[in-house]
Image: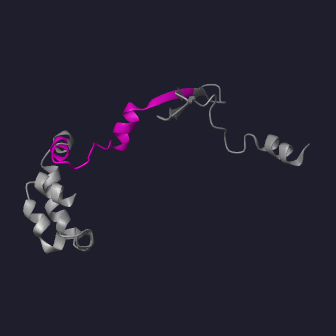
Amino acid sequence: MFSALAKAMGHAEWSEDERFSTNVQRVHHRDELDEHLVPLFFSKSKLEWREILNRHGVPSDIVATVPEALEKATWVEHDHPDGGSSVKSLIGSYRLDGEILVAPRRSPNLGEHANEVIEDWLGE
C-alpha cells in the first residue's frame, strides 16, 4: 500500500528508501516521513487527493471536520422545562430496520428523575 501511496505522491523512490521499506521502519522514521508527506498533502485540495489516491489504488475518502459534520447533521428540538426555550438533539445517521431513531423527548436534567428511579429501585 505504501508503494502505491509513494507513486501517487510522485515519489516512487520512497518505497526503495530503507527508512520507509517496511511498516516498522516507517513508524521508526515517522517524523522524517511526515516531513515529506505533510507539505505534499497541503499542496492540493481534499477532493484532488481523493481522486489521485483512488486512481493509484490507495483507499481513501474525505473525513469531515467536526464543524463540517455538524453543518450537515440533522437535529430535532425538544421543549426545555423552563418553558421558554428548546434543547437541540443530534439525530444519528444510523438506522434500525430502515428507520431513523429520534429521541421522543429531551435528555433529563441532572437529578430530574431521581425520585422515580429511587422509588423503582426500592419498590415503593
Percent coordinates x, y for residue 114 in the rendering = 77, 44
Residue 66 belongs to magenta span: yes
Relative placement, left or right, of 34 versus 99 is left
Left or right of residue 104, residue 8 in this image? left
Name the residue located 40 percent from the left edge and 36 percent from the top edge. 70
Q: Nearer the viewer, residue 124 or 28?
A: 28
How many callouts does the rendering have? Answer: 0
**What residue appears at the point 16 percent right and 41 percent down from the top-left corner?**
48
Of all residues, the one furthest to the right in this rendering is 124
* Identity of the residue drawn at 65% across and 25% down: 83
Quadrant (top left, top right, bottom left, bottom right) of the C terminus: top right
Q: In the picture, which quadrant includes the N terminus?
A: bottom left
Where does residue 82 sit, x and y in percent of width and height?
A: 65, 30
Q: Which residues are magenta?
A: 51-77
Q: Nearer the viewer, residue 25 or 36?
A: 25
Residue 94 or residue 74, whichever sits in front? 94
Quadrant hosting residue 78: top right
Q: Position of residue 52 (x, y in %)?
A: 15, 44
Look at the picture and state if 81 lies above or below 108. above
- Compared with residue 76, is residue 27 higher up or lower down, i.e. above or below? below
Q: Quadrant of residue 15?
A: bottom left
Does residue 122 show up magenta in the picture? Answer: no
At which x and y percent is residue 16?
11, 68
Q: Nearer the viewer, residue 30 or 75?
A: 30
Task: Identify which residue is drawn at 34% across, 38% down.
Answer: 68
